[in-house]
Amino acid sequence: MRTVKALAKHIQESLKDTKSCTIYESELERVWPSEKIKRLGREKKIHAFAKAYGLTADIRDPGIRVVFKKAPK
């Protein structure tokens, strides 16, 4: 997955069968490279992405994984 849309599609497909979808650093790095975006900016972008796609993002162990879930209605 190298694009935001591809990542969103992957997460949405996963959430059809499970309550959460964990995305690890190797996948995050392709969309939001840590060497180009400072940590706080990266976290803001991840949360904005989640909101835009009707998700929540729980950033765990910054720089290692993010758990996405469907946002409550």
Image (cartoon, helix red, strand yellow):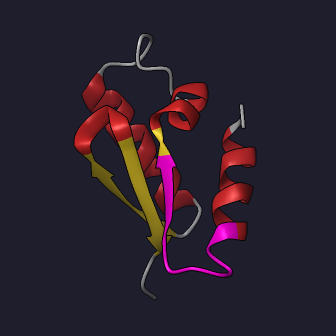
Q: Residue at x 66, y 69 (%)?
A: 14
Residue at the bottom extreme of this rendering: 73
Spot occupied by residue 67 in the image (x, y as percentages of width and height): 41, 59
Q: Residue at x 59, y 62 (%)?
A: 53
What predominant SS class does the magenta segment belong to? loop
Q: Nearer the viewer, residue 38 or 67?
A: 67
Is 57 left or right of 39, judged from the image as shown?
A: right
- Quarter placement of the N terminus: top right
Is 55 left or right of 9, judged from the image as shown?
A: left
Residue at the top extreme of this rendering: 35
Spot occupied by residue 63 in the image (x, y as percentages of width and height): 33, 32
The stretch of residues the image draws in magenta is 14-23
Is 11 left or right of 23, judged from the image as shown?
A: right
Whether 2 is drawn above or below 48: the answer is above
Spot occupied by residue 59 in the image (x, y as percentages of width and height): 31, 50
The quadrant holding residue 31 is: top right
Find out whether residue 34 is within the magenta segment. Answer: no
Q: Residue at x 52, y 27 (%)?
A: 29
Whether 50 is drawn above or below 62: the answer is below
Is 20 left or right of 59, judged from the image as shown?
A: right
The quadrant holding residue 4 is: top right
